Amino acid sequence: MKAAKVVGKTKRKLSRALHQRRRSSPGTAPGTLIADPEAHPPRIHVASYDESGIEERDDIDVATAIAMRGKHRVLWIDVSGLADLGVIEEIGKAFGLHSLALEDVVNNHQRPKVEDFDHSIFIVTRMLVPERGVETEQVSMFLGKDFVITFQEQHGDCLSPVRERMRRDRTRLRQEGPDYLAYALIDAVIDGYYPVLEAYGEMIEQLEDEVLADPDPRQIDRLHQVKRDLLNLRRAVWPTREMVHAMERGENHLITDGTRIYLRDCYDHAIQLMDVVETYREIASGLLDVYLSSMSAKMNEVMKVLTIIATIFIPLSFVVGLYGMNFDTSSPWNMPELHFRYGYPAVLLFMALAAGGLVFWFKKRGWLGERRR
Amino acid sequence: MKAAKVVGKTKRKLSRALHQRRRSSPGTAPGTLIADPEAHPPRIHVASYDESGIEERDDIDVATAIAMRGKHRVLWIDVSGLADLGVIEEIGKAFGLHSLALEDVVNNHQRPKVEDFDHSIFIVTRMLVPERGVETEQVSMFLGKDFVITFQEQHGDCLSPVRERMRRDRTRLRQEGPDYLAYALIDAVIDGYYPVLEAYGEMIEQLEDEVLADPDPRQIDRLHQVKRDLLNLRRAVWPTREMVHAMERGENHLITDGTRIYLRDCYDHAIQLMDVVETYREIASGLLDVYLSSMSAKMNEVMKVLTIIATIFIPLSFVVGLYGMNFDTSSPWNMPELHFRYGYPAVLLFMALAAGGLVFWFKKRGWLGERRR
Amino acid sequence: MKAAKVVGKTKRKLSRALHQRRRSSPGTAPGTLIADPEAHPPRIHVASYDESGIEERDDIDVATAIAMRGKHRVLWIDVSGLADLGVIEEIGKAFGLHSLALEDVVNNHQRPKVEDFDHSIFIVTRMLVPERGVETEQVSMFLGKDFVITFQEQHGDCLSPVRERMRRDRTRLRQEGPDYLAYALIDAVIDGYYPVLEAYGEMIEQLEDEVLADPDPRQIDRLHQVKRDLLNLRRAVWPTREMVHAMERGENHLITDGTRIYLRDCYDHAIQLMDVVETYREIASGLLDVYLSSMSAKMNEVMKVLTIIATIFIPLSFVVGLYGMNFDTSSPWNMPELHFRYGYPAVLLFMALAAGGLVFWFKKRGWLGERRR
Amino acid sequence: MKAAKVVGKTKRKLSRALHQRRRSSPGTAPGTLIADPEAHPPRIHVASYDESGIEERDDIDVATAIAMRGKHRVLWIDVSGLADLGVIEEIGKAFGLHSLALEDVVNNHQRPKVEDFDHSIFIVTRMLVPERGVETEQVSMFLGKDFVITFQEQHGDCLSPVRERMRRDRTRLRQEGPDYLAYALIDAVIDGYYPVLEAYGEMIEQLEDEVLADPDPRQIDRLHQVKRDLLNLRRAVWPTREMVHAMERGENHLITDGTRIYLRDCYDHAIQLMDVVETYREIASGLLDVYLSSMSAKMNEVMKVLTIIATIFIPLSFVVGLYGMNFDTSSPWNMPELHFRYGYPAVLLFMALAAGGLVFWFKKRGWLGERRR
Amino acid sequence: MKAAKVVGKTKRKLSRALHQRRRSSPGTAPGTLIADPEAHPPRIHVASYDESGIEERDDIDVATAIAMRGKHRVLWIDVSGLADLGVIEEIGKAFGLHSLALEDVVNNHQRPKVEDFDHSIFIVTRMLVPERGVETEQVSMFLGKDFVITFQEQHGDCLSPVRERMRRDRTRLRQEGPDYLAYALIDAVIDGYYPVLEAYGEMIEQLEDEVLADPDPRQIDRLHQVKRDLLNLRRAVWPTREMVHAMERGENHLITDGTRIYLRDCYDHAIQLMDVVETYREIASGLLDVYLSSMSAKMNEVMKVLTIIATIFIPLSFVVGLYGMNFDTSSPWNMPELHFRYGYPAVLLFMALAAGGLVFWFKKRGWLGERRR
């Protein structure tokens, strides 16, 4: 249903994906943070919880957020908007985050990955927000002994199901540690791909119907767009799969065995996404073949009509041209037919027979074969 | 024989495959069961057996089914229809099944897989029921120390051979434990793919004959449909192969070495299916090439006829048009040919020679080459 | 030389390959033997030999064959024709063969494979008999401590070189145990692929010459057939390679280290076959491109002739039509050219110049370019 | 922006890549250095530094450079221009570099790789200098306990960011050992690919727009060039990825654990490059399909116009030719229509109706379908 | 430069590659030598050397050659020409070579490989001799404790650089053992591929230029030939890479660690060859696309000219035909235009306007678009 709304928003994404990576000023060391000039101002949301209770604060400053550490078993700091490097650096210092990881937070065109640091795990995922088409937004995540810190590019995300679950008592989320929260967030991000893929499924089916019914060059443009978007989705989904797999198989003690079972489930979903993307890509490729065959069939049809008309009438035109010649009929050798009493009807009859013969020959060759189809 | 009946029923499956996965209400935790609104009402069939005897009960309630545990060495509870979550939860509680696995039972678009839990193995397979085309139905299976529990989406399956074997004394099935039953069920599911693949084999051969005899655009539509269905089949068969392999190689003590030999046999069959699906896909791709070549050959033929006719008659029409001009023949320079005694026969002769020359030239170039083919 | 004879006999093989696998009557357990209704009656040939001597018996009954066990170091029972299940079962019982393996003997559409049972190794190969095209025949083989048992679908095979070697004293074959015999048989089966592949090589080269000389739609049909046959061959050769590799690397003590060196040689041959099949497939695919390019070049040629003729004569026909108009020349404005003394020659000259100009323009564009090629 | 400047400079690179590798004079042993006749004269730049300070010298002779060893913790000798083999050999002797590695320095068409020698690591990277298009320049690097030696083909590189960072106190670079310098150099080389890839991204997008708007054969030439350049880039990027991976995973003690974390970051960037190159290649391939579809659609359009015009006017021309015949109308059977009072209007009307009927028929078949698109 | 000379000599190689492998007479055991009837007579060249000196003998008999063993540290027997099986068997016996390996020497269509026997290593390489195109010649090599034995199919090879190095004192070759000699020979064989690949590079570039400038069907034939030759080269290069890798990684004590470093260098070269072959193949495939696009563009051009001419003149011809009708103008309804004073100029004007209108319409649609390209 939302196919049209979702598809086609990634145009111009291609080259932009590479822009920011370059460190702009020469002499900048790796690990130095440089803000994207288009970044949004940060807004900090904090949730501190365990079985006993939950404390939530929205739109607070970074010092307050950090100070909440230790109140409960799990602290989740969620920063949306990356314009203020001070905030990122302060959090990094307070929680002992590696500068290279912080650099990846700011250069928000990373592939999904997981990196194991001493006291924290750094996770990069890419989130699809339905309103923004296939343009993915980077969600960077740090998982520590008693905290999860997430950085998003913009406000608005697909994590609200996790927040709502957190607010209810007695959910598994409230009983488990930060590793389960990290899992829940990754799971929510992966869940966010489903409606978008669904929209592409509908899009492809619609295209399929149209191509089969009436091939048209503009379908190729749309098909190309769909294939390109699927290529982009694959670039996000493929490393997500690897990332979840690495988390599940990893040896870091920050992730408990109980959570690993959930990650395996998550991994299944990532494989399923992969599977669907690949299937769509194959169907889209097949559609191109169908399109080309249909077009060539249409062209064949056009050519056949032309050939039939021309093949029948060109010889007839020759005949009537023949008797339009102005030879001097005073010589008995010159066009005596013109003076025959039944010359005209005879010519008409001859032409009718010739045309009929050709039509019969065409039928035999199957060129008029409307009936046979 | 049943090719036409089987093929082409999966239309519209594409996007539906993704619908249910999304947990509908925000805030729903993983492991929460939500019934598919289109699910069938459950019907429970139980068989409890060992060498000594067998007790079968059909259409009973869930408590009765659970109470039968322990009567014999093997208990098989088969639930078809997933509309009543209470049933699933009750069974899950009684046999200690993991909530994530139960969630996968209900969200019936899982890929075939095997998951090893503490006291049970969770197996997902996808069953083909010939009457329903390539639309696979999920069969979820739990294998425990003394039980096998299967969940199917609908009534009616391809497992009756197993049931009949079970009723006969002295079969291997009756002498072995639940792992052998699980193997027998998986084997029956895999067996169910053969007639469907056979139907596609016939379909492709028929298409092959038609394309070679008389290429037609509608064949491309059918070819596209066949390729898409094979793509769907591959998505079901490929993970089945992996699933059987994982069971055979797995280290779970619930599966005995004797059963592993049978699973190896099962694995061979899955590979064979894979092999056939891939071969069909390659043949189908090759057919497209044949189709396109045939079409372009046909078009060439049409063009040649047009060219021959036009090339012969257009110059002749020019000649007769020439002598149809109305120049004032009182000037001796203006078209004196018209007054020649043999002007008309000479022109006719000239045109016959010209046409003959062209026909000869065409023959030399091989354009009339009916004889050479 | 035998290309035509060999190629094209596999038609209709496609779907048949899947027929028999299904156990026909419901309730049949795995390991139950069901004869193929088209199977040949069995004929048993036995050879018992070691360095000291050889005893051969042909067309004997199964009990006699079994009784020969132990006479020499190696007993080879060769059963061709699988119609009599009693024979197979009796041999199975006498030599302790697994029922699943015996089932695979009868369901003769197995992929080449090797399976390690307790006291025997079960080997499936597929034999090409030149007279039967690419339709492979299953040769099942059991290798034990003191025996090799082979089952073939039909009488007639490519194993006679082994038999002749066996009859001569002092050959390595006579000095080695049953594992060397198994190797020799597998090697003979692999050798049997060479003449068939050679025939396809010739076939492809002939097609290559024809396509380059004169593309014709029927070549595409043959090319399609060749590609399909190569696909079938690949399906037989690929698992053969794996099978030999598994035997060479396997840990079963039934195969001695000396024989493993020979198996490595065998493996090289299987890889070489694989290599040739893949190369042929790539060349065949390349040929299709050549064909399509040639066809489109031919079409281009045809179109150019049409265009040249039409483009020259259509304007000329217009001119002569113009002076065929019947305007009342009593008005001095109406077609005064008709009354010019040199009107007709002037028009002829004008038309000759126009035609010449067009020919010159075509030449400049390279459309008449016979000379340039 | 710089797309046009960057793209298309690699022409003629293809065969040259293979020239120098051949040792020119027969009898030359491996490890013998032979200068490329086109090599640049060497220029040596040296930097010796640690936390305490830095000493830089430019354009000095080789003995002075070697003598600086040991002054600080890290010595970086950078030689640009490989014409003087004496320089290379002298350095090789002084630092104990393997002769095979030195040969690879001179034969500057190596693939990126890392080789582990006893007391040094030999690293080959390929540097992109924006001004030179996709023609990569080999940067060979030796990493030892207290030195990094780099050899470049030409003056001018993309390493100045590293040099500037080195000059500033308190940067990480100054505090770490030579392994970190090697990392920083590799990272700078990889960074150098981003602007070039960006240019290709823009190029492809521009081509995409043009192909969708108005397909033109010259786009295919450019597309071919782009694909070829991407192929070249892939040949440089792919082994770079492997090289960084081998360094990160390698066991050589010359690389500290701290630096390995940075190399992992580097590896991420290499994967990202790979990813972008592959995506571009896929998009470029897709573009070809779009181009071909558009062209065939255009052709279809042309053919339709021709067919419509010809199909309408050829029959009409026949009719007017018919009444241009000169039958002797003194016979009442010969063309009495000519004498009808309303003969001419009747014929005009008939022709108008015929033409209208054809137009209607075309519309029904969708051939005039301007409105429907 | 030598492109034309090198390319296209492999024709007919295809099927021959398979001929000899079949053991011709039934009953021949593996390990039996059967001479190729087309084999050359053998010629033996021996070099015995160590640091202290070298003794070389050419064209001697086999006994003399064998007797030279032990004179120096390394003995190299080089046999070119395989017609005399006695020579091969005698050498085999003297140096304890395995009969299967000797069989592979004679059946000279082996893939490059390395096989580890007890006291010797058997190496197969395929040598390219520039004069013979891409037809490779098998060089079989045995490496033992104190000898290297090589068998070549023909006289003349690319090993003379090694021989010349051997004759000079103090080269590394003279100081090292037989493993280094084996390396040097393999390296020389690999070096021999470079000039041939270079020729193909030039060939492809030339084709590229021609296809872009003026597509022509004969280019496709050449392209097909080039692709086929590259396929053949790949079949030789790919296993060479594996062979060198296996030697470098192998555990045989006959190869010293020092030599392994040189083999690693050799491996790099083999990978580089592989890389070039694959790149050429991709470029060649891309060229086909360019060719097809160019051809279809050319065809489009031709069609447009035809359409423009026909579309302009067919309606005009109708008009002039109209006024050539012979209606009896005594009726005022019949063609009164013919009697108008300005009828003829009016018709001319009308036709000029119609033609102009069509030309304008074509321009607007971009069909005359010479200027826009």
Image (cartoon, coloured by chain):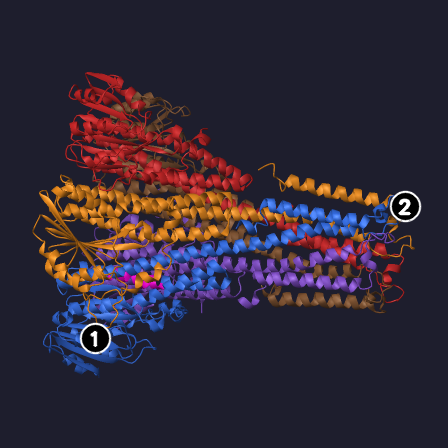
Chain colours: A brown, B purple, C blue, D red, E orange
**Above or below, A340 relative to A172:** below
Q: Report which residue position mark 2 lands on.
A: C331
Compared across the picture, whether D272 is left or right of C177 comes to right
Residues under numbered marks 2 and 1 in contact, where contact means CB atoms less than 8 Å apart: no
Q: Secondary structure at mark 1?
A: helix
Mark 2 is surrounded, within 10 Å at the Cα level, by few (under 14), some (14 to 19) or many (20 or more) other residues, namely some
**Is residue A200 among what the camera can see?**
yes
- Quadrant assignment, res E330: bottom right
Which numbered marker is on residue C163? 1
Depth order, front residue of A82/C96: C96
Write the start and end of the magenta stretch as one range.
C232-244
* Location of residue D92 in the rendering, given as x and y in whole percent from the top left corner: 19, 30
Q: Number of numbered discs present?
A: 2
**Is residue B41 among what the camera can see?**
no
Residue C233 included in the magenta stretch of the image: yes
Which numbered marker is on residue A94? none
Compared across the picture, whether B179 is left or right of E320 comes to left
Pointer 2 chain = C
* Location of residue C39 in the rendering, given as x and y in whole percent from the top left corner: 32, 77
Q: Quadrant of the C terminus of chain E?
A: top right
Which amino acid does the dot numbered 1 rest on?
A: Arg
Main SS type for the magenta part? helix
Which amino acid does the dot numbered 2 rest on?
A: Ser
The residues bearing labels 2 and 1 have C-alpha atoms spaced at a distance of 108 Å
Pointer 1 chain = C
